[in-house]
Image (tube, rainbow, N blue to C red):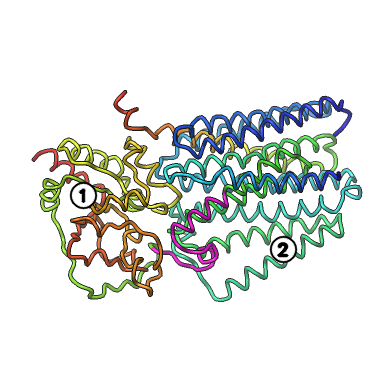
């Protein structure tokens, strides 16, 4: 199969998985789920690394230089997205306590 | 990729697959209370795995020094940690909006960078049409996500340049449609006639403007929906970037987030009984509609003093607290919890009724009350809460408005008609803590306040609740 067609197949199937995975979510978890999936969308960090890498080969060329700078910036922003997203989600989830848990304290 | 053994390359692809599986498990667990925290951890392990796999993939190519990559990751990590730890819980909606924007921006930069590199290397003639198409779409969606999220951030943060109320002007919708069409034309041009690299900045500029124009007409109270939708966009942008780079991990994960974001968007819209189109283009901003309030004579409004309220509480056995955005603004969650403690010491049962769209982001109230150490069993969703109101002696409304308006049930002329509400009026007595009757909350007048069972307790939520709490402790 053409790699492009494979990609399309994977894309469509993954969308269906996404719909299935989150079907019933309690209101309690809406915020952590939003920020948690937001952190996952920082997966673009993989793209940023790949983009930065393929450019560093020959810095002389203007396009190369532009590519490197864009890749460098992309890594910074994607990392903020990933690190900030996961840490803040954990901070929120840490606060959810059940009645039983409180008596234990 | 370059000279790399097939076995090695294959095993890296399998590691990517493993990372994607971890994300799926993580999301699944994140949607259940008991496993949520572990789910988030698992998904972060997936992310670490994806990054390490990518670093292994890059270091196969001996040409580059990793130093710049390490520097960029270090800067991003420090900034991310600072943001995550410094932001107060009341600032969560803005924080999520900002992070989301960064994700979109990163995807857009990735696509631009890769395109420039490949054109620079003279590779583009060998790149098929769908490469250019993917670049164009990533730039389009990524840019809209970026500026859209930044406007949402500004509105939530209360910045002056981005007013909370809808910004509407004549011809707004045709203008947006026109910009989108122009953008699409440029994407097609890029696709059929590469290397038309100059089209990329044009697409970016138009899409950045479009992101701003799409979010400014949306009112502050509709932000939960916007945040979910932008979250979905940032996932889609990531998936498109995966098409640019032929990276399966990006495609799977991006579309996963894109789809789950849409589900959440849909949940939010249902909670307001409005279509997505109405939220995005309706220009309704319930609480933020601004001046022009007319306090029509629908009846008299009863007011309470703190003492009146204390007496009412003393004879109660079941109390429902109904928090809203006003509680978040006044940062009153901790004093609310203290007051609830005092009530519980008197043997009064206290629960919280939480509307899905109360506050400025999905589940906003739950997070704030959890911060104040309220056990989550006491936080009731719409249906369980409505089952409780009939037995409640007192419903204490703190800074919530539209979600308690009985007009939503029967007044077809009301803009919120049909929205599922909390049936506060079923309680024996209703006490509403509010700054004043008149300003700000103008768009829709709340019938509840004219209910003979309802009494208003005017003042700042935090001050009033603190005073209530003090008096309840004394008597």
Residue B264 in the magenta stretch? The answer is yes
Residue B274 position within the rendered picture, expressed as x and y whole percent measured from the top left: 48, 64
Q: Estimate how packed mark 2 is, as few (under 14), some (14 to 19) or many (20 or more) residues with alpha carbons within 10 Å.
A: many
Q: Estimate how packed mark 1 is, as few (under 14), some (14 to 19) or many (20 or more) residues with alpha carbons within 10 Å.
A: many
Q: What stretch is highlighted in magenta?
A: B261-286
Q: Which residue lies furthest to the left in this view?
A: B475
Mark drawn on residue B464: 1
Left/right of residue B454 with respect to residue B146 in the rendered view: left
- Quote the CA–CA distance across marks 1 and 2: 53 Å
Residue B331 image-quadrant placement: top left
Q: Residue furthest top?
A: A104
Q: In this view, does A75 lie above or below B269?
A: above
Mark drawn on residue B84: none
Q: Residue at x 18, y 61 (%)?
A: B453
- Check disc 2 and report its element: helix, strand or loop: helix
Residue A33 position within the rendered picture, expressed as x and y whole percent measured from the top left: 51, 42
**Chain letter of disc 1 in the image:** B
Give the tally of numbered discs: 2
Left/right of residue B126 with respect to residue B450 in the rendered view: right
**Chain letter of disc 2 in the image:** B
Residue for badge 2: B183
Q: Which residue is drawn at 61% across and 37% down?
A: B24
Residue A4 position within the rendered picture, expressed as x and y whole percent measured from the top left: 82, 47
- Check disc 1 and report its element: helix, strand or loop: helix
Q: Dividing the image into 4 quarters, which one contains the C terminus of chain B? A: top left
Q: Is residue B105 above or below residue B426?
A: above
Between residues A6 and B151, which one lies in front from this camera angle? A6
């Amino acid at each position: 199969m053409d790699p492009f067609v494979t990609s399309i197949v994977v894309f469509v199937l993954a969308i269906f998985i996404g719909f299935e995975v989150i079907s019933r979510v309690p209101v309690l978890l809406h915020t952590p789920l939003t920020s948690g999936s937001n952190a996952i969308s920082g997966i673009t960090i993989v793209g940023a690394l790949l983009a930065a890498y393929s450019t560093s080969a020959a810095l002389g060329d203007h396009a190369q230089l532009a590519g490197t700078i864009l890749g460098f910036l992309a890594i910074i922003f994607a990392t903020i997205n990933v690190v900030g997203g996961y840490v803040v989600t954990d901070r929120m989830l840490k606060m959810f306590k059940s009645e039983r848990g409180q008596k234990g304290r | 990729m370059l000279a790399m053994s097939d076995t090695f390359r294959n095993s890296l692809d399998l590691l990517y697959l493993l990372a994607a599986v971890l994300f799926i498990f993580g999301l699944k667990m994140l949607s259940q209370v008991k496993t949520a925290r572990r789910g988030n951890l698992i998904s972060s392990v997936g992310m670490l795995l994806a990054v390490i796999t990518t670093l292994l993939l890059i270091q196969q190519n001996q040409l580059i020094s990793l130093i710049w990559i390490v520097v960029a990751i270090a800067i991003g990590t420090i900034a991310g940690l600072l943001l995550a730890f410094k932001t107060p819980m009341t600032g969560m909606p803005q924080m999520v909006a900002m992070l989301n924007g960064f994700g979109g921006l990163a995807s857009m930069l990735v696509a631009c960078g890769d395109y420039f590199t490949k054109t620079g290397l003279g590779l583009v003639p060998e790149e098929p049409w769908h490469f250019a198409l993917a670049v164009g779409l990533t730039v389009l969606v990524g840019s809209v996500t970026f500026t859209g999220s930044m406007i949402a951030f500004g509105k939530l943060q209360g910045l002056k340049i981005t007013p909370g109320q809808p910004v509407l002007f004549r011809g707004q919708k045709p203008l947006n449609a026109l910009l989108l069409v122009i953008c699409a034309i440029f994407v097609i041009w890029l696709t059929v006639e590469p290397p038309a690299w100059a089209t990329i900045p044009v697409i970016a500029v138009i899409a950045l403007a479009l992101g701003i124009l799409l979010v400014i007409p949306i009112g502050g109270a509709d932000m939960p929906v916007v945040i979910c939708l932008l979250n979905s966009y940032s996932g889609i942008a990531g998936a498109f970037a995966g098409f640019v780079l032929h990276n399966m991990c990006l495609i799977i994960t991006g579309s996963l987030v894109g789809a789950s974001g849409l589900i959440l968007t849909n949940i939010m819209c249902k909670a307001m009984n409005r279509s997505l189109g109405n939220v995005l283009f309706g220009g309704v901003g319930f609480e933020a509609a601004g001046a022009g309030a007319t306090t029509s004579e629908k009846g008299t409004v009863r007011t309470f003093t703190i003492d009146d309220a204390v007496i009412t509480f003393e004879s109660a056995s079941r109390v429902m607290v109904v928090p809203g955005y006003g509680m978040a603004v006044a940062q009153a969650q901790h004093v609310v919890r203290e007051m609830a403690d005092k009530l519980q010491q008197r043997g009064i049962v206290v629960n919280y009724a939480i509307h899905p769209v109360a506050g400025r982001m999905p589940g906003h109230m739950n997070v704030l009350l959890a911060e104040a150490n309220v056990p989550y069993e006491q936080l009731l969703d719409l249906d369980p809460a409505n089952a409780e109101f009939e037995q409640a002696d007192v419903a204490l409304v703190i800074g919530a408005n539209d979600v308690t308006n009985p007009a939503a049930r029967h007044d077809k002329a009301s803009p919120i008609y049909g929205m599922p509400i909390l049936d506060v009026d079923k309680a024996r007595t209703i006490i509403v803590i509010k700054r004043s009757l008149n300003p700000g909350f103008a768009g829709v007048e709340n019938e509840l306040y004219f209910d003979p069972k309802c009494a208003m307790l005017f003042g700042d939520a935090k001050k009033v609740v603190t005073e209530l709490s003090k008096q309840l402790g004394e008597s």
